[in-house]
Image (cartoon, rainbow, N blue to C red):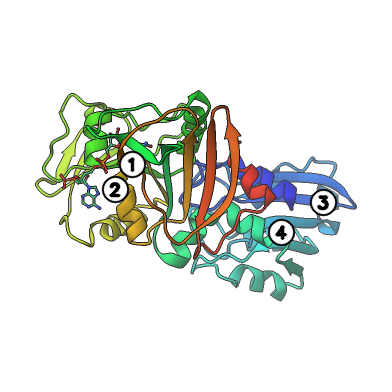
Amino acid sequence: MMRCLQLAQRAEGYAAPNPLVGAVLVHQGRIIGEGFHQVYGAAHAEVNCFASVSEADRVLIPESTLYVSLEPCAHFGKTPPCADRVIRERVQRVVVANRDPFAAVDGKGIDKLLAAGIQVDTGVLEQDAAWLNRRFFCVHTRNRPYIILKWAQTQNGFFAPADRSRLQISNSWSKRLNDRWRAKESAIMVGTITAINDNPRLTSSYGHVPLRIALDRTLRIPATHQLLQEGPATWIVNELEAGNSGSVRYHKLPFDDRLLTQLLDELSAVGKNSLIVEGGVQLLQSFIDQGLWDEARVFIAGDVDSNGIQAPRLSEALHCADWPLGDNRLHYYIHNNNSYAPGTLGLHSLDL
Ligand SMILES: NC(=O)c1ccc[n+]([C@@H]2O[C@H](COP(=O)([O-])OP(=O)(O)OC[C@H]3O[C@@H](n4cnc5c(N)ncnc54)[C@H](OP(=O)(O)O)[C@@H]3O)[C@@H](O)[C@H]2O)c1
Protein backbone atom coordinates (compact mmCIF):
# COMPACT_ATOMS: atom_id res chain seq x y z
CA MET A 1 0.00 0.00 0.00
CA MET A 2 2.93 2.30 0.65
CA ARG A 3 3.93 1.75 -2.98
CA CYS A 4 0.36 2.60 -4.07
CA LEU A 5 0.64 5.93 -2.25
CA GLN A 6 4.04 6.66 -3.81
CA LEU A 7 2.58 6.03 -7.26
CA ALA A 8 -0.59 8.02 -6.56
CA GLN A 9 1.41 11.04 -5.44
CA ARG A 10 3.09 11.31 -8.82
CA ALA A 11 -0.13 12.75 -10.26
CA GLU A 12 -0.35 15.65 -7.78
CA GLY A 13 -1.59 18.67 -9.69
CA TYR A 14 -2.69 16.58 -12.69
CA ALA A 15 -5.45 14.27 -11.44
CA ALA A 16 -7.73 16.95 -9.95
CA PRO A 17 -10.66 17.10 -9.67
CA ASN A 18 -10.24 13.33 -9.56
CA PRO A 19 -8.51 11.70 -6.59
CA LEU A 20 -4.89 10.53 -6.49
CA VAL A 21 -4.94 6.74 -6.75
CA GLY A 22 -2.24 4.09 -7.03
CA ALA A 23 -2.65 0.33 -7.56
CA VAL A 24 -0.25 -2.58 -7.21
CA LEU A 25 -0.85 -6.22 -8.13
CA VAL A 26 1.10 -8.75 -6.07
CA HIS A 27 1.56 -12.46 -6.70
CA GLN A 28 3.21 -14.40 -3.88
CA GLY A 29 5.23 -11.41 -2.73
CA ARG A 30 6.24 -10.27 -6.22
CA ILE A 31 4.81 -7.14 -7.81
CA ILE A 32 3.53 -8.14 -11.24
CA GLY A 33 1.78 -4.89 -12.10
CA GLU A 34 1.43 -1.31 -10.93
CA GLY A 35 -0.22 1.86 -12.12
CA PHE A 36 -1.70 5.17 -11.04
CA HIS A 37 -4.32 7.61 -12.24
CA GLN A 38 -2.02 9.94 -14.14
CA VAL A 39 -4.19 12.72 -15.41
CA TYR A 40 -7.81 13.81 -15.16
CA GLY A 41 -10.01 12.03 -17.69
CA ALA A 42 -7.45 9.30 -18.46
CA ALA A 43 -7.42 5.64 -17.35
CA HIS A 44 -7.82 4.88 -13.65
CA ALA A 45 -5.08 3.32 -11.52
CA GLU A 46 -6.49 -0.24 -11.66
CA VAL A 47 -6.70 -0.17 -15.47
CA ASN A 48 -3.10 1.07 -15.79
CA CYS A 49 -2.03 -1.57 -13.27
CA PHE A 50 -3.60 -4.45 -15.24
CA ALA A 51 -2.17 -3.01 -18.48
CA SER A 52 1.34 -3.11 -17.02
CA VAL A 53 1.27 -6.87 -16.35
CA SER A 54 3.53 -8.73 -18.76
CA GLU A 55 2.03 -11.30 -21.14
CA ALA A 56 3.80 -14.08 -19.23
CA ASP A 57 2.37 -12.93 -15.88
CA ARG A 58 -1.23 -12.42 -17.00
CA VAL A 59 -2.05 -16.02 -16.06
CA LEU A 60 -1.12 -15.15 -12.43
CA ILE A 61 -3.73 -12.37 -12.07
CA PRO A 62 -6.49 -14.60 -10.66
CA GLU A 63 -4.10 -15.76 -7.91
CA SER A 64 -2.95 -12.23 -7.07
CA THR A 65 -3.89 -9.55 -4.56
CA LEU A 66 -4.73 -6.09 -5.83
CA TYR A 67 -3.72 -3.25 -3.51
CA VAL A 68 -5.44 0.03 -4.31
CA SER A 69 -5.32 3.26 -2.32
CA LEU A 70 -8.97 4.19 -2.98
CA GLU A 71 -12.05 2.00 -3.34
CA PRO A 72 -12.48 0.96 -7.02
CA CYS A 73 -15.18 3.06 -8.66
CA ALA A 74 -18.63 1.62 -9.34
CA HIS A 75 -20.01 4.14 -11.81
CA PHE A 76 -19.62 5.16 -15.44
CA GLY A 77 -17.79 8.49 -15.38
CA LYS A 78 -15.20 9.38 -18.00
CA THR A 79 -14.20 5.69 -17.88
CA PRO A 80 -16.15 2.44 -17.12
CA PRO A 81 -16.39 1.14 -13.52
CA CYS A 82 -13.08 -0.23 -12.19
CA ALA A 83 -14.90 -2.65 -9.85
CA ASP A 84 -16.30 -4.43 -12.96
CA ARG A 85 -12.82 -4.63 -14.46
CA VAL A 86 -11.39 -6.14 -11.23
CA ILE A 87 -14.18 -8.74 -11.25
CA ARG A 88 -13.53 -9.58 -14.92
CA GLU A 89 -9.84 -10.09 -14.19
CA ARG A 90 -10.91 -12.62 -11.48
CA VAL A 91 -8.61 -11.17 -8.81
CA GLN A 92 -9.13 -13.09 -5.53
CA ARG A 93 -8.41 -10.41 -2.98
CA VAL A 94 -8.49 -6.62 -2.97
CA VAL A 95 -6.89 -4.47 -0.25
CA VAL A 96 -8.16 -0.89 -0.04
CA ALA A 97 -6.87 2.05 1.99
CA ASN A 98 -9.89 4.41 1.85
CA ARG A 99 -13.54 4.12 1.04
CA ASP A 100 -14.44 6.70 -1.65
CA PRO A 101 -16.62 9.50 -0.17
CA PHE A 102 -17.80 10.53 -3.68
CA ALA A 103 -21.58 9.92 -3.67
CA ALA A 104 -21.59 7.88 -6.91
CA VAL A 105 -19.17 5.37 -5.32
CA ASP A 106 -19.30 5.57 -1.49
CA GLY A 107 -19.11 1.84 -0.71
CA LYS A 108 -20.76 0.65 -3.92
CA GLY A 109 -17.44 -0.42 -5.44
CA ILE A 110 -16.60 -2.52 -2.38
CA ASP A 111 -20.12 -4.00 -2.36
CA LYS A 112 -19.75 -5.04 -6.00
CA LEU A 113 -16.47 -6.82 -5.26
CA LEU A 114 -17.92 -8.58 -2.22
CA ALA A 115 -21.00 -9.65 -4.19
CA ALA A 116 -18.66 -11.22 -6.77
CA GLY A 117 -17.07 -13.30 -3.99
CA ILE A 118 -13.82 -11.30 -3.80
CA GLN A 119 -12.18 -10.94 -0.38
CA VAL A 120 -11.94 -7.22 0.43
CA ASP A 121 -9.82 -5.79 3.24
CA THR A 122 -10.09 -2.07 3.96
CA GLY A 123 -8.39 0.52 6.14
CA VAL A 124 -4.75 -0.32 5.36
CA LEU A 125 -2.64 2.88 5.76
CA GLU A 126 -5.97 4.65 5.91
CA GLN A 127 -4.69 7.82 7.57
CA ASP A 128 -1.77 8.31 5.19
CA ALA A 129 -3.97 7.68 2.16
CA ALA A 130 -6.61 10.13 3.41
CA TRP A 131 -3.93 12.77 3.93
CA LEU A 132 -2.72 12.28 0.37
CA ASN A 133 -6.28 12.74 -0.92
CA ARG A 134 -7.26 15.47 1.54
CA ARG A 135 -8.12 17.89 -1.26
CA PHE A 136 -10.52 15.44 -2.94
CA PHE A 137 -12.00 14.32 0.39
CA CYS A 138 -12.53 17.91 1.51
CA VAL A 139 -14.59 18.74 -1.58
CA HIS A 140 -16.76 15.64 -1.13
CA THR A 141 -17.23 15.84 2.63
CA ARG A 142 -17.18 19.62 3.30
CA ASN A 143 -18.34 20.90 -0.08
CA ARG A 144 -15.50 23.34 -0.49
CA PRO A 145 -11.93 23.26 -1.78
CA TYR A 146 -9.13 22.39 0.64
CA ILE A 147 -7.54 25.69 1.70
CA ILE A 148 -3.84 26.23 2.30
CA LEU A 149 -2.58 29.55 3.68
CA LYS A 150 1.00 30.49 2.97
CA TRP A 151 3.04 33.49 4.00
CA ALA A 152 6.45 34.68 5.16
CA GLN A 153 7.06 36.81 8.23
CA THR A 154 9.99 38.18 10.16
CA GLN A 155 11.02 36.72 13.48
CA ASN A 156 9.59 39.78 15.23
CA GLY A 157 6.17 39.10 13.71
CA PHE A 158 6.03 41.48 10.75
CA PHE A 159 4.70 40.72 7.34
CA ALA A 160 5.27 43.83 5.24
CA PRO A 161 6.59 47.39 5.59
CA ALA A 162 4.12 50.05 6.72
CA ASP A 163 3.94 51.52 3.19
CA ARG A 164 2.96 48.04 1.93
CA SER A 165 5.86 47.94 -0.47
CA ARG A 166 7.40 44.61 -1.38
CA LEU A 167 9.91 43.24 1.13
CA GLN A 168 11.73 40.01 0.37
CA ILE A 169 11.38 37.93 3.53
CA SER A 170 11.67 34.39 2.22
CA ASN A 171 14.97 33.01 0.89
CA SER A 172 15.69 31.15 -2.36
CA TRP A 173 14.96 27.74 -0.75
CA SER A 174 11.55 28.78 0.48
CA LYS A 175 10.75 30.37 -2.86
CA ARG A 176 11.70 27.18 -4.68
CA LEU A 177 9.56 25.09 -2.35
CA ASN A 178 6.66 27.44 -2.84
CA ASP A 179 7.08 27.13 -6.59
CA ARG A 180 6.62 23.35 -6.27
CA TRP A 181 3.65 23.73 -3.92
CA ARG A 182 1.79 25.93 -6.40
CA ALA A 183 1.94 23.16 -9.01
CA LYS A 184 -0.03 20.85 -6.70
CA GLU A 185 -3.03 23.11 -6.20
CA SER A 186 -6.05 23.82 -8.37
CA ALA A 187 -6.21 27.54 -7.62
CA ILE A 188 -4.08 30.32 -6.12
CA MET A 189 -5.30 33.63 -4.73
CA VAL A 190 -4.10 37.09 -3.64
CA GLY A 191 -5.75 40.25 -2.34
CA THR A 192 -5.95 43.56 -4.21
CA ILE A 193 -3.01 45.36 -2.60
CA THR A 194 -0.73 42.38 -3.14
CA ALA A 195 -1.83 42.13 -6.77
CA ILE A 196 -1.14 45.84 -7.27
CA ASN A 197 2.02 46.38 -5.20
CA ASP A 198 3.81 43.07 -5.79
CA ASN A 199 2.65 42.53 -9.39
CA PRO A 200 2.97 38.71 -8.99
CA ARG A 201 2.73 36.15 -11.81
CA LEU A 202 1.37 33.40 -9.52
CA THR A 203 2.68 30.69 -11.81
CA SER A 204 4.85 27.64 -11.20
CA SER A 205 7.82 26.34 -13.12
CA TYR A 206 6.84 22.76 -12.24
CA GLY A 207 4.32 22.07 -14.96
CA HIS A 208 0.77 22.50 -13.76
CA VAL A 209 -0.26 26.14 -13.24
CA PRO A 210 -3.24 26.72 -10.95
CA LEU A 211 -6.17 28.99 -11.76
CA ARG A 212 -5.03 32.48 -10.67
CA ILE A 213 -7.46 34.57 -8.67
CA ALA A 214 -7.20 38.16 -7.46
CA LEU A 215 -9.78 40.20 -5.58
CA ASP A 216 -10.18 43.58 -7.23
CA ARG A 217 -13.46 45.14 -6.13
CA THR A 218 -13.21 48.31 -8.22
CA LEU A 219 -10.84 47.04 -10.96
CA ARG A 220 -7.77 48.90 -9.78
CA ILE A 221 -5.11 46.44 -10.95
CA PRO A 222 -3.24 48.19 -13.80
CA ALA A 223 -3.81 46.63 -17.24
CA THR A 224 -0.04 46.29 -17.67
CA HIS A 225 0.28 44.01 -14.60
CA GLN A 226 1.32 40.38 -15.09
CA LEU A 227 -1.98 38.89 -13.88
CA LEU A 228 -3.82 40.69 -16.67
CA GLN A 229 -1.50 39.59 -19.45
CA GLU A 230 -2.41 36.68 -21.75
CA GLY A 231 -1.41 33.50 -19.95
CA PRO A 232 -2.87 30.98 -17.51
CA ALA A 233 -6.58 31.19 -16.70
CA THR A 234 -7.23 34.05 -14.30
CA TRP A 235 -10.27 35.25 -12.39
CA ILE A 236 -10.49 38.90 -11.41
CA VAL A 237 -13.19 38.93 -8.76
CA ASN A 238 -14.86 42.31 -8.73
CA GLU A 239 -18.11 44.19 -8.16
CA LEU A 240 -18.36 45.98 -11.50
CA GLU A 241 -17.96 43.74 -14.50
CA ALA A 242 -18.58 40.24 -15.81
CA GLY A 243 -17.05 38.81 -18.99
CA ASN A 244 -13.92 37.41 -20.55
CA SER A 245 -10.90 39.06 -22.06
CA GLY A 246 -8.48 36.43 -23.37
CA SER A 247 -7.39 34.25 -20.47
CA VAL A 248 -8.85 36.69 -17.93
CA ARG A 249 -12.37 36.23 -16.66
CA TYR A 250 -13.96 39.17 -14.88
CA HIS A 251 -15.99 37.49 -12.21
CA LYS A 252 -18.68 39.68 -10.71
CA LEU A 253 -19.68 38.96 -7.10
CA PRO A 254 -21.15 41.04 -4.27
CA PHE A 255 -18.35 42.10 -1.88
CA ASP A 256 -20.19 41.27 1.33
CA ASP A 257 -19.64 38.85 4.23
CA ARG A 258 -20.39 35.89 1.97
CA LEU A 259 -17.80 36.78 -0.66
CA LEU A 260 -15.27 34.09 0.27
CA THR A 261 -17.82 31.30 0.74
CA GLN A 262 -19.50 32.20 -2.53
CA LEU A 263 -16.18 32.17 -4.32
CA LEU A 264 -15.32 28.79 -2.77
CA ASP A 265 -18.70 27.41 -3.93
CA GLU A 266 -17.94 28.54 -7.45
CA LEU A 267 -14.49 26.99 -7.35
CA SER A 268 -15.97 23.65 -6.24
CA ALA A 269 -18.56 23.89 -9.01
CA VAL A 270 -15.81 24.13 -11.65
CA GLY A 271 -13.85 21.21 -10.16
CA LYS A 272 -11.21 23.10 -8.21
CA ASN A 273 -10.30 20.87 -5.26
CA SER A 274 -7.82 23.16 -3.55
CA LEU A 275 -6.84 26.77 -3.10
CA ILE A 276 -3.56 28.22 -1.89
CA VAL A 277 -3.86 31.74 -0.50
CA GLU A 278 -0.63 33.74 -0.69
CA GLY A 279 -1.53 37.08 0.95
CA GLY A 280 -1.74 39.88 1.81
CA VAL A 281 -2.44 39.97 5.47
CA GLN A 282 -5.98 41.28 5.08
CA LEU A 283 -7.02 38.46 2.79
CA LEU A 284 -5.27 35.80 4.87
CA GLN A 285 -6.81 37.13 8.08
CA SER A 286 -10.31 37.05 6.57
CA PHE A 287 -9.88 33.36 5.70
CA ILE A 288 -8.62 32.72 9.25
CA ASP A 289 -11.40 34.72 10.93
CA GLN A 290 -14.06 32.83 8.97
CA GLY A 291 -12.48 29.49 9.87
CA LEU A 292 -11.90 28.87 6.17
CA TRP A 293 -8.54 27.14 6.17
CA ASP A 294 -7.12 23.66 6.57
CA GLU A 295 -3.37 24.08 6.49
CA ALA A 296 -0.96 26.98 7.05
CA ARG A 297 2.66 27.11 5.95
CA VAL A 298 4.57 29.97 7.50
CA PHE A 299 8.16 30.86 6.67
CA ILE A 300 9.91 32.75 9.45
CA ALA A 301 13.04 34.61 8.45
CA GLY A 302 15.88 34.67 10.91
CA ASP A 303 17.72 37.83 10.05
CA VAL A 304 15.23 40.21 8.46
CA ASP A 305 13.63 42.75 10.73
CA SER A 306 10.78 44.96 9.82
CA ASN A 307 8.15 47.04 11.41
CA GLY A 308 4.92 47.91 9.78
CA ILE A 309 2.15 45.46 9.09
CA GLN A 310 1.76 42.63 11.61
CA ALA A 311 1.61 39.07 10.26
CA PRO A 312 -1.75 37.24 10.29
CA ARG A 313 -2.80 35.71 13.60
CA LEU A 314 -3.76 32.07 13.32
CA SER A 315 -6.50 30.76 15.58
CA GLU A 316 -7.73 27.19 16.13
CA ALA A 317 -4.34 26.03 14.87
CA LEU A 318 -2.32 22.92 15.69
CA HIS A 319 1.42 23.26 15.18
CA CYS A 320 2.54 20.03 13.46
CA ALA A 321 6.19 20.52 12.74
CA ASP A 322 8.91 22.96 11.76
CA TRP A 323 12.05 22.62 9.69
CA PRO A 324 15.08 24.77 8.89
CA LEU A 325 15.38 26.05 5.34
CA GLY A 326 18.68 27.87 5.24
CA ASP A 327 18.14 31.03 7.31
CA ASN A 328 14.33 30.56 7.20
CA ARG A 329 12.30 28.20 9.31
CA LEU A 330 9.13 26.67 7.93
CA HIS A 331 6.31 26.23 10.46
CA TYR A 332 3.55 23.89 9.50
CA TYR A 333 0.05 24.06 11.02
CA ILE A 334 -3.27 22.37 10.46
CA HIS A 335 -6.67 23.70 11.53
CA ASN A 336 -7.85 21.85 14.61
CA ASN A 337 -10.97 20.65 12.81
CA ASN A 338 -8.98 19.29 9.87
CA SER A 339 -9.94 15.60 9.90
CA TYR A 340 -6.74 14.64 8.12
CA ALA A 341 -3.42 14.61 9.90
CA PRO A 342 -0.06 14.28 8.22
CA GLY A 343 1.74 11.15 9.36
CA THR A 344 5.45 10.77 8.57
CA LEU A 345 4.52 10.06 4.97
CA GLY A 346 2.31 13.15 4.80
CA LEU A 347 5.05 15.46 5.99
CA HIS A 348 7.34 13.84 3.45
CA SER A 349 4.83 14.75 0.71
CA LEU A 350 5.58 18.44 1.33
CA ASP A 351 8.73 17.99 -0.75
CA LEU A 352 11.09 19.17 1.94
N1 LIG B 1 4.94 38.35 3.75
C1 LIG B 1 4.23 37.74 2.84
O1 LIG B 1 4.22 36.51 2.74
C2 LIG B 1 3.42 38.56 1.89
C3 LIG B 1 2.59 37.92 0.94
C4 LIG B 1 1.80 38.70 0.11
C5 LIG B 1 1.83 40.08 0.24
N2 LIG B 1 2.66 40.66 1.15
C6 LIG B 1 2.68 42.11 1.35
O2 LIG B 1 1.47 42.45 2.01
C7 LIG B 1 1.12 43.80 1.67
C8 LIG B 1 -0.33 43.79 1.22
O3 LIG B 1 -1.14 43.27 2.25
P1 LIG B 1 -2.55 43.89 2.54
O4 LIG B 1 -3.12 43.18 3.72
O5 LIG B 1 -2.36 45.35 2.59
O6 LIG B 1 -3.34 43.59 1.20
P2 LIG B 1 -4.18 42.41 0.51
O7 LIG B 1 -4.77 41.49 1.50
O8 LIG B 1 -3.36 41.89 -0.61
O9 LIG B 1 -5.31 43.31 -0.14
C9 LIG B 1 -6.21 44.00 0.67
C10 LIG B 1 -7.38 44.46 -0.15
O10 LIG B 1 -7.96 43.34 -0.82
C11 LIG B 1 -9.37 43.36 -0.68
N3 LIG B 1 -9.74 42.29 0.26
C12 LIG B 1 -8.93 41.52 1.02
N4 LIG B 1 -9.66 40.62 1.71
C13 LIG B 1 -10.93 40.81 1.38
C14 LIG B 1 -12.16 40.18 1.74
N5 LIG B 1 -12.18 39.16 2.60
N6 LIG B 1 -13.30 40.64 1.21
C15 LIG B 1 -13.28 41.67 0.36
N7 LIG B 1 -12.15 42.30 -0.04
C16 LIG B 1 -10.99 41.87 0.46
C17 LIG B 1 -9.71 44.72 -0.14
O11 LIG B 1 -9.78 45.61 -1.25
P3 LIG B 1 -10.74 46.91 -1.28
O12 LIG B 1 -10.20 47.80 -0.22
O13 LIG B 1 -10.60 47.45 -2.67
O14 LIG B 1 -12.12 46.45 -1.00
C18 LIG B 1 -8.48 45.05 0.68
O15 LIG B 1 -8.25 46.43 0.87
C19 LIG B 1 2.08 44.22 0.59
O16 LIG B 1 3.13 44.95 1.20
C20 LIG B 1 2.65 42.92 0.09
O17 LIG B 1 3.96 43.06 -0.43
C21 LIG B 1 3.44 39.94 1.98
Q: Earlier in the sequence, mark 4 or mark 3?
A: 3
Q: CA distance from mark 1 to mark 3?
A: 46 Å
Residue at coordinates 49% horizontally, 24% vertically from top-left? 172
Instruction: Choose between 2 and 31: the one closer to the eye.
Output: 2
Q: Position of residue 32 (x, y in %)?
A: 81, 45
The residue that disc 1 covers is 279
**Pointer 1 with pointer 2, Cβ within 8 A:** yes
Q: CA distance from mark 3 to mark 2?
A: 49 Å
Residue 255: tell me if it is visible: yes
| Mark 2 or mark 4, whichever is nearer to me | 2
Q: Check disc 2 and report its element: helix, strand or loop.
A: helix
Q: Earlier in the sequence, mark 1 or mark 3?
A: 3
Say whether mark 1 is within 8 Å of ligand 1: yes
Q: How many marks?
A: 4
Q: CA distance from mark 4 to mark 3?
A: 17 Å
Q: Using the image, determine if residue 285 lies above or below residue 156.
A: below
| Mark 1 or mark 4, whichever is nearer to me | 1
Q: CA distance from mark 2 to mark 4?
A: 36 Å
Say whether mark 2 is within 8 Å of ligand 1: yes
Q: Position of residue 20 (x, y in %)?
A: 57, 50
| Mark 1 or mark 3, whichever is nearer to me | 1
Q: Earlier in the sequence, mark 2 or mark 4?
A: 4
Crowding at dot 4, Cα within 10 Å, few <14 / some 14-19 / many 20+, comes out as: some
The residue that disc 3 covers is 26
The residue that disc 2 covers is 283
Tag 3: amino acid = Val
Residue at coordinates 66% horizontally, 55% vertically from top-left? 128
